[in-house]
Image: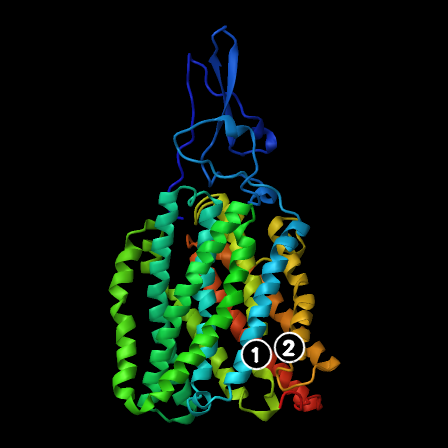
C-alpha cells in the first residue's frame, strides 16, 4: 500500500498535446482519468487515441464511485495496449441493495461460525482444564480477537491491495502472499505470548495466587493456538480474496466476514484441544510446556526475514505492533469479565452467547472499516486529501444519514443486526444451547445490547478511520484491531449487564440444557 503512484501518461506529437478530457467536466478541481491525443493517420485524418491513466489512487473520484464492484467490466480501454500490465478495474457505483446482497451471505456464514464457537465454549467450559485453570477463559476473547488483530487486518490489507491493482500480476501476488503470511506468523507468536502473560496477571490480581505450571500451560496453549490458527486462516483468506476478484465481487464485502466465520470456531477448538492435551501431560510439565514455547519462538527469525523482503509488510513489521498489542489487552479485559461471570449461576448460559454477540459486532464493523479505508486509498495516500479526513468527531447524522456511500453501507450493516441475531438465537434454541430459555424479555434485552454495541462501533469506525488517515496511518493496519477489541469488550460487558438485569427482575430460567 505504500507504493508510489505512477506518473500520468501524456503524449506530445507534432506539437499536439492531449485534448481536454470529457471527465474533467464532472466537477471543479477534478483530475481527468482519461486523456485524448490526436495522431495523423495515413490519409492525413486525425485519429483520436484514448489514454487511460494508470494511477490507482487518482484523486477526485466521486464518493459514489469510489468502491470497486466488478473487475470483469469491459470498457473502451480494452483496446489500448500498454507495457505496464493490466490496468486496475474501473470503480462502479454500489447501491444499498448490492451492498446488502454481497454482505448478507458472508455475514450469515460468519454468524453461524460464531454460533458454533458458542456451542463449543458451552461444552468445553465444563472440562477439567477449564475448571482447574480458569485463566483459560481470559485467553478466549484475546485469542478469538486475533481474527481482528491479524486475520481481519490481513483481509482488509489484501482487499485494498487487490482493489487498487497491486495484486494483478503473478509476481505482485506472490510477493503479497509470502510477505503477509510471514508477517501474521510473527504477530501471532508475539501476541499469543503476550496474551498468556495478560491471562496470568489478570488471574493473579483478584486471587493473589500464582502457579508456575499454570503459567507455562497458558503460554504453550496460547502460542500454539495463535500460530496454527493464523496459518490456517491466513491461507483461507488469500484464497477468498483471489476468488472474489475472479468472479467480480468486492473483496471488502466478503473477506472479513469469512475470516470470522471460521476464525472463532477454529481458534476455540484449537485452544480447547491443545490446552486439554497439555493438561493431560501436567506430570511432565517442566519439560513439555517450555519445549512447546521454545519451538514456536525459535521460528520467529525465519518469519521476520521473509516479512522484511516485501515492501508492503516491512513497514507493518516495524510499526504495526501498537494496535495489536493494545487490542489484545482490551480483549483480555473482556476475558476477565467472562472469567468472573461464566461460573456464576446467575449468568448461566452467557458462555454460548458471548462469541455470537462479540463476533457479529466485530464482523460488521470490520466490513465498514475496510470499505472506508478502500475509499480513502482510492483517493490518495495516508495523510493526503485532508478534505476527506475531518479533524473533529462526525455527528451521528453524518455517519448514518448522509447520502455518501459509506453512510449507506453503515445503514445496511446496522439493519442486519436484528434479523441476523434472531436467526442465530433461533439456531441456539433449536440446538438447546446456553442452559437458558429464550423468553421475550430476554430477546428484548439481548437485542438492545447488540444494537447498542454495533451502533457505537460503526460511529467509532467512521471517526477512527478518518482520524488515522489524517495522521498518515494506514487504517487497514491500525483501525480494525482496535475496533474488534472494542467490540469484544462492549459485547461482553453489555451482555453481562443484560444478564444481571434479567436476574434482578427474575426473568432467568436455567432449566434448558442442564
Q: Residue furthest right?
A: 440
Question: Would you identify the image quadrant in which residue 317 lies?
Answer: bottom left
Asked whether disc 2 touches disc 1, contact meaning CB atoms under 8 Å apart, the reply is yes
Q: Where residue 189 appears, x then y in whole percent? A: 34, 70
Q: Where residue 374 appears, x then y in whole percent? A: 51, 50
Q: Where residue 371 appears, x then y in whole percent? A: 54, 53
Q: Is residue 81 above or below residue 343?
A: above
Question: Is residue 135 left or right of 219 when viewed as pictured?
Answer: right
Q: Where residue 133 appears, x then y in whole percent? A: 41, 89
Q: Of the numbered discs in the image, which one, if any, rests on residue 119?
A: 1
Question: Would you identify the image quadrant in which residue 314 lies?
Answer: bottom left
Q: Secondary structure at mark 2?
A: helix
Question: Is residue 257 left or right of 306 when viewed as pictured?
Answer: right
Q: Is residue 103 above or below residue 328?
A: above
Looking at the image, which is closer to me, 461 or 225? 225
N-terminal label among 2 and 1: 1
Which residue is at a point 41% across and 35% down the rendered structure image? Answer: 85
Q: Of the numbered discs in the image, which one, if any, rests on residue 428?
A: 2
- The quadrant of the rendering that contains the C terminus is bottom right
Looking at the image, which is closer to me, 470 or 332? 332
Observer able to see residue 395: no
Packing grade of label 2 (10 A; few <14, some 14-19, many >=20) is many
Q: Is residue 255 above or below residue 23?
A: below
Observer able to see residue 434: yes
Packing grade of label 1 (10 A; few <14, some 14-19, many >=20) is many
C-alpha distance separating marks 2 and 1: 8 Å
Q: Is residue 420 above or below residue 375?
A: below
Number of numbered discs: 2
Question: Would you identify the image quadrant in which residue 396 lies?
Answer: bottom right
Question: Is residue 419 left or right of 373 when viewed as pictured?
Answer: right
Which residue is at a point 47% across and 50% down the rendered structure image? Answer: 242
Q: Secondary structure at mark 1?
A: helix
Amino acid at each position: 500500500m505504500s507504493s508510489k503512484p505512477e506518473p500520468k501518461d501524456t503524449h506530445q506529437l507534432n506539437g499536439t498535446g492531449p485534448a481536454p478530457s470529457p471527465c474533467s467536466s464532472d466537477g471543479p478541481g477534478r483530475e481527468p482519468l482519461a486523456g485524448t491525443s490526436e495522431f495523423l493517420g495515413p490519409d492525413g485524418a486525425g485519429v483520436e487515441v484514448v489514454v487511460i491513466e494508470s494511477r490507482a489512487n487518482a484523486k477526485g473520484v466521486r464518493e459514489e464511485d469510489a468502491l470497486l464492484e466488478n473487475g470483469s467490466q469491459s470498457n473502451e480501454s480494452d483496446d489500448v495496449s500498454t507495457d505496464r500490465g493490466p490496468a486496475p478495474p474501473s470503480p462502479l457505483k454500489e447501491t444499498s441493495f448490492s451492498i446488502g446482497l454481497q454482505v448478507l451471505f458472508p455475514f450469515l456464514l460468519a454468524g453461524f461460525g460464531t454460533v458454533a464457537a458458542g456451542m463449543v465454549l458451552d461444552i468445553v467450559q465444563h472440562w477439567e482444564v477449564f475448571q482447574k485453570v480458569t485463566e483459560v477463559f481470559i485467553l478466549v476473547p484475546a485469542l478469538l480477537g486475533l481474527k481482528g488483530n491479524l486475520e481481519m487486518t490481513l483481509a482488509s490489507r489484501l482487499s485494498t491491495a487487490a482493489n487498487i491493482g497491486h495484486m494483478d500480476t503473478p509476481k505482485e501476488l506472490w510477493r503479497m502472499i509470502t510477505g503477509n503470511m510471514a508477517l501474521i506468523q510473527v504477530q501471532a507468536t508475539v501476541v499469543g505470548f503476550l496474551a498468556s502473560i495478560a491471562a496470568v496477571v489478570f488471574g493473579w490480581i483478584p486471587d493473589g495466587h500464582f502457579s508456575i505450571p499454570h503459567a507455562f500451560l497458558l503460554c504453550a496453549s496460547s502460542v500454539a493456538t495463535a500460530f496454527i490458527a493464523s496459518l490456517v486462516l491466513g491461507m483461507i483468506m488469500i484464497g477468498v480474496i483471489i476468488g472474489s476478484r475472479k468472479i467480480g465481487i468486492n473483496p471488502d464485502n466478503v473477506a472479513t466476514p469469512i475470516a470470522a466465520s471460521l476464525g472463532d470456531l477454529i481458534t476455540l477448538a484449537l485452544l480447547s484441544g491443545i490446552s486439554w492435551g497439555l493438561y493431560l501431560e501436567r506430570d511432565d510439565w517442566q519439560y513439555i510446556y517450555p519445549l512447546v514455547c521454545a519451538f514456536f519462538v525459535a521460528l520467529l527469525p525465519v518469519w521476520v526475514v521473509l516479512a522484511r523482503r516485501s515492501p508492503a509488510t516491512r513497514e507493518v513489521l516495524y510499526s504495526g505492533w501498537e494496535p495489536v498489542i493494545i487490542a489484545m489487552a482490551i480483549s483480555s479485559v473482556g476475558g476477565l469479565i467472562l472469567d468472573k461471570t461464566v461460573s456464576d449461576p446467575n449468568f448461566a448460559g452467557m458462555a454460548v452467547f458471548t462469541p455470537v454477540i462479540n463476533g457479529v459486532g466485530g464482523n460488521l464493523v470490520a466490513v465498514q472499516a475496510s470499505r472506508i479505508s478502500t475509499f480513502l486509498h482510492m483517493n490518495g495516500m495516508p495523510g493526503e486529501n485532508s478534505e476527506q479526513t475531518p479533524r473533529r468527531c462526525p455527528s451521528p447524522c453524518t455517519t448514518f444519514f448522509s447520502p455518501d456511500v459509506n453512510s449507506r453501507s453503515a445503514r445496511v450493516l446496522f439493519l442486519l443486526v436484528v434479523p441476523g441475531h434472531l436467526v442465530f438465537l433461533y439456531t441456539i434454541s433449536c440446538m438447546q444451547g446456553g442452559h437458558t430459555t429464550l423468553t421475550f424479555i430476554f430477546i428484548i434485552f439481548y437485542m438492545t445490547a447488540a444494537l447498542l454495541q454495533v451502533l457505537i462501533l460503526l460511529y467509532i469506525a467512521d471517526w477512527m478511520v478518518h482520524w488515522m488517515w489524517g495522521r498518515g496511518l494506514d487504517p487497514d493496519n491500525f483501525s480494525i484491531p482496535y475496533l474488534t477489541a472494542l467490540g469484544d469488550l462492549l459485547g461482553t460487558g453489555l451482555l453481562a449487564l443484560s444478564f444481571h438485569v434479567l436476574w434482578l427482575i427474575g426473568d432467568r430460567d436455567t432449566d434448558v440444557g442442564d
